[in-house]
């Protein structure tokens, strides 16, 4: 059995050696807020935090997580970024949004008032096909309001 | 009273003559400008659950016993299956059902394009399904594919007869022209790549099939599945509460739905069939490539005397022929226009509608050509467009039901006037310039669409309509419309959508038609409920109905009386007020279109061919704007997708095999947040007084249409180079620069 620390809780799961963290979270722990859009580490939709570091959970094997604390969108539901994304209309279809918010939470944790360039750099690994990018930038610029 | 009329119906520029049942639309339009709720920014109703990861997309459904499917697909451009043995897959761990070409019409032994489905497996887990699928013993016999669109036209390999349109006399136009320009433009195939891939979960309950699907049109899927499986339509229930984008490619059931339905029937379990990202990039539809051979002639004052266009559209093995000639036929007043469009049938994956299909490609060619003409005539490009403004439909003289393109041009001036200032930023190899392009598109919507409204004794209202919210925020717009009519604050309105068994018919989320089609039905339903509330209040408070109205959550009397709505509806106890509404007809004898202008500012490194877009101003006329916040997001999203296919996106085929090279999201380059310029959105926001009880048109597609041409024209302004193909890769940019230099040298020698 594998022990995982997720969003402040302790979980056990029994994933195969080849199973990704994303699939383990979604299928074994029922945490479906983490989305898988490409499954090969190109789009950022599956981003979670491992000890606060943004990580692509679709290309991270569950068995490599070890003692690190996993934070998913379910653990960030009360983060002010959620309201900021809604307020700025940074949500269209919403499929990339959980991953965007997880990435943004790490960005503002390290740098509470990021500049436009810092936002663009920090968020460039999270694709949004609807094109909410200007709204995402606004949400991250105003999250503390 | 319901009337049966024979009328023209338009979806994405596809017209058909058909019987349509329309109901009276007796409501007067609201006054222009922001009202209590309509016309004011509203955050989207489904925003919190989407942002919090609570919204359930298809992959998030956890039906008991759910199986996962994998599909065996043709890896060649064209092949024949010479041997197929499914038995090893059936014996693999976790496998519950396997189907082949004998079991479902969507599976084939003679795949005519890459990715065509041959067999499918359902197993307890996705990994087991994929592992079993790889055990299927199959021998492919690759066949010579047809890949060249011009060759297809020459050989008569077409999906449909060539479409020709003619008005006036091109020879006369040539005689009247002082200048004639010919040019060939090309656009590449691009991929939708919605972040939720195409997928469905199918589940049988007795003889009823429930299809949970990421779709833009639950009713279209219902009709298609019912027909294919020989079921009564009410035995097919189609559900789509949330979807992760579509952009035109999710209008049909798709082979994945039929695979899931058949595997579910055989296994007695619900089955999910989802495309992987790599399958999505091969086989889920694409914006077809085009070759556009265009000619334009004008008098020296800029008056257009002729336009001709030959359009070769690489549709793939099947699909429909989008109106690539539409912009040439519709955008300008010109007496002599001749177009022909060919739909080349090739051994490549079939096209699918992609946000303003045809018009995106055709506008690139036409609007670049117009700027080439302006340069030749030494006329201001904005002025050239003004001089050729179409005051009525250039094809048949029909009046427009509402056209504010001239106002778009007026508002574009402020951005256009930045030209000298922008050009002056040029330094060293970096040249700066400004370009603009106009746009025309449909967006009137039409009947039928229906809505119900339920007002409970607590005075809260629920809109019920079986439409989908593709992600554009239409759910919020419907709530705003209902709130306005019922005089309720927005937070007292809920919207239930996305279930064909639990709501009335609503239009496709495509063709910029949802708001203009369903919106008026929602308003009519709310008005029906409001009328009943007034009737009840009149009896309870002993007033005449005509002195009562609904406002701010109250029933208001002209004599100063005011009662909270919940006091009136509270009389009902468990009773409910039910309103129903239908979309009325479009104005007869008129043409309803949407318009816009975009002004782009770019910088080009003339040594490396690097292109940077600095700013785009998007000015659009879509009638009344329901939600300025959501509308701005639609405009920005369209512009950003436009920048994608202008500069970085293209589906690449291996020229030797005809198979897709760009299968992943690192090979297929979508715009990132770092690629986004400053975007200025300006919506005219004037109701179309002839169109429905709202005066609102669709907005989803117009903003993507002129972006490519505006950027290309800005590149010409910056460098003098005529870029003629999309995407404008560095290779194309450098080619155009070399050609411009050569032209300059020849000109200098001649001078």
Image (tube, coloured by chain):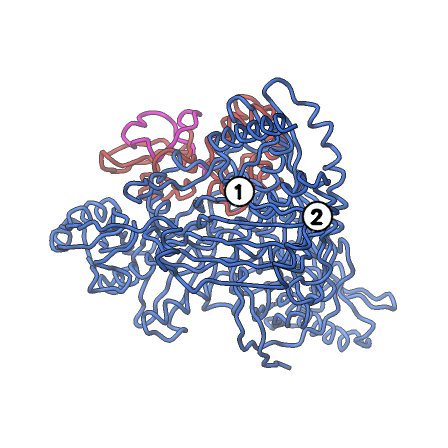
Chain colours: A red, B blue
Q: Give the x, y percent position of residue B677.
A: 60, 33
Find the magenta span and give its range: A50-74
Is residue B504 visible in the rendered structure shown here?
A: no
> B368 or B453, which lies in front?
B368
Which residue corresponds to mark 1? B641
In the rendered image, which quarter contains the C terminus of chain A?
Answer: top right
The answer to whether tags 2 and 1 share a subunit is yes
- Count residues near mark 1 (Cα–Cα under 10 Å), then give few for <14, some for 14-19, many for 20+: many
Which residue corresponds to mark 2? B385
- Residue B154 picture quarter: bottom left
| Magenta highlight on residue B263 | no
- Chain of the residue where label 2 is placed in the rendered structure: B
Q: Give the x, y percent position of residue B244.
A: 46, 48
Q: Give the x, y percent position of residue A22.
A: 35, 37
Alpha-carbon span between mark 2 and mark 1: 25 Å
Is residue B716 visible in the rendered structure shown here?
A: yes
- Disc 1 on helix, strand or loop? helix
In the rendered image, which quarter contains the N terminus of chain A?
Answer: top left
Q: What residue is shown at x 58% (from left), y 75% (from top)?
A: B7
Q: What residue is shown at x 22% (from left), y 33% (from top)?
A: A17
């Amino acid at each position: 059995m594998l022990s995982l620390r997720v969003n402040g809780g302790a979980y056990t799961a029994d994933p195969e050696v080849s199973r990704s963290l994303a699939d383990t979270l979604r299928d074994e722990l029922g945490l479906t807020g983490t989305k898988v859009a490409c499954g090969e580490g190109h789009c950022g939709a599956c981003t979670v935090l491992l000890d606060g570091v943004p990580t692509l959970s679709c290309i991270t094997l569950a068995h490599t997580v070890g003692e690190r604390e996993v934070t998913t969108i379910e653990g960030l539901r009360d983060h002010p970024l959620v309201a900021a994304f809604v307020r700025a209309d940074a949500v269209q279809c919403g499929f990339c949004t959980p991953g965007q918010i997880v990435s943004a939470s790490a960005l503002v944790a390290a740098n509470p008032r990021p500049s436009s360039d810092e936002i663009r750099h920090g968020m460039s690994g999270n694709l949004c096909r609807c094109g909410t990018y200007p709204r995402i930038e606004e949400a991250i610029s105003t999250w503390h309001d | 009273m319901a009337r049966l009329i024979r009328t023209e119906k338009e979806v994405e520029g596809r017209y058909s003559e058909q019987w349509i049942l329309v109901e009276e639309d007796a409501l007067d339009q609201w006054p222009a400008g922001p009202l209590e709720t309509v016309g004011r920014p509203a955050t989207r109703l489904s925003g919190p659950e989407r942002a919090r990861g609570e919204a359930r997309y298809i992959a998030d459904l956890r039906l008991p016993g759910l199986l996962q499917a994998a599909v065996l697909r043709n890896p060649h451009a064209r092949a024949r299956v010479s041997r197929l043995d499914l038995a090893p897959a059936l014996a693999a761990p976790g496998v519950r059902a396997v189907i082949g070409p004998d079991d479902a019409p969507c599976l084939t032994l003679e795949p005519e394009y890459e990715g065509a489905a041959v067999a499918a497996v359902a197993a307890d887990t996705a990994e087991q399904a994929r592992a079993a699928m790889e055990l299927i013993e199959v021998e492919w016999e690759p066949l010579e594919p047809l890949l060249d669109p011009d060759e297809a036209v020459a050989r008569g390999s077409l999906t449909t007869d060539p479409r020709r349109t003619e008005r006036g006399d091109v020879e006369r136009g040539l005689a009247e022209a002082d200048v004639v320009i010919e040019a060939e433009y090309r656009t590449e195939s691009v991929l939708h790549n919605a972040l939720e891939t195409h997928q469905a979960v199918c589940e049988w309950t007795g003889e009823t099939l429930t299809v949970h699907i990421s779709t833009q049109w639950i009713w279209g899927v219902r009709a298609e599945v019912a027909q294919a499986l020989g079921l009564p339509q009410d035995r097919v229930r189609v559900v789509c509460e949330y979807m992760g984008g579509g952009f035109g490619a999710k209008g049909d059931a798709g082979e994945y739905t039929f695979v899931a339905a058949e595997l579910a029937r055989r296994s007695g379990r619900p089955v999910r069939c989802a495309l992987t990202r790599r399958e999505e990039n091969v086989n889920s539809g694409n914006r077809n490539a085009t070759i556009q051979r265009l000619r334009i002639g004008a008098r020296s004052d800029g008056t257009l005397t002729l336009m001709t266009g030959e359009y070769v559209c690489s549709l793939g093995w099947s699909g429909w022929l989008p109106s690539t000639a539409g912009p040439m036929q519709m955008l300008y007043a010109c007496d002599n226009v001749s177009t022909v469009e060919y739909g080349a049938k090739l051994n490549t994956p079939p096209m699918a509608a992609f946000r303003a299909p045809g018009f995106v490609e055709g506008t690139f060619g036409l609007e670049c050509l117009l700027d080439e003409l302006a340069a030749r005539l030494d006329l201001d490009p904005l002025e050239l467009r003004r001089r050729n403004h179409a005051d009525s439909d250039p094809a048949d003289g029909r009046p427009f039901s509402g056209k504010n393109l001239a106002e778009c041009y007026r508002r574009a001036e402020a951005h256009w006037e930045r030209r000298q200032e922008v050009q002056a930023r040029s330094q060293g190899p970096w040249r700066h310039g400004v370009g603009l392009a106009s746009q025309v598109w449909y967006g009137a919507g039409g009947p039928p669409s229906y809505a119900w409204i339920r007002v409970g004794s607590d005075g809260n209202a629920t809109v019920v309509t079986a439409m989908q919210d593709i992600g554009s925020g239409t759910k919020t717009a419907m709530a705003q419309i209902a709130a306005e009519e019922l005089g309720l604050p927005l937070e007292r309105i809920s919207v239930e959508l996305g279930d064909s068994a639990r709501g009335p018919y609503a239009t496709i989320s495509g063709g910029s038609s949802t708001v203009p089609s369903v919106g008026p039905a929602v308003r009519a339903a709310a008005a029906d409920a409001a009328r009943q509330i007034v009737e009840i209040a009149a009896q309870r408070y002993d007033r005449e109905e005509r002195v009562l109205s609904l406002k701010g959550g109250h029933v208001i009397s002209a004599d100063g009386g005011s009662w909270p709505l919940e006091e009136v509806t509270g009389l009902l106890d468990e009773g409910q007020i039910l309103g129903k509404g239908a979309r009325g007809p479009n104005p007869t004898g008129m043409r309803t279109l949407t318009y816009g202008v975009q002004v782009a500012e770019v910088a080009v490194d003339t040594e490396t061919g690097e292109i940077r877009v600095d700013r785009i101003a998007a000015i659009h006329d879509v009638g009344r704007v329901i939600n300025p916040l959501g509308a701005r997001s639609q405009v920005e999203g369209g512009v950003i997708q436009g920048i994608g296919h202008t500069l970085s996106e293209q589906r690449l085929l291996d020229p030797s095999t005809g198979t897709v090279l760009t299968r992943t999201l690192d090979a297929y380059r979508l715009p990132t947040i770092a690629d986004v310029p400053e975007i200025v959105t300006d919506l005219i926001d004037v109701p179309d007084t002839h169109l429905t009880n709202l005066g609102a048109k669709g907005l989803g597609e117009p903003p993507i249409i002129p972006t490519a041409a505006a950027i290309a024209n800005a590149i010409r302004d910056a460098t003098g180079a005529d870029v003629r193909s999309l995407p404008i890769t560095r290779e194309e940019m450098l080619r155009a620069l070399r050609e411009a230099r050569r032209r300059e040298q020849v000109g200098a020698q001649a001078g």
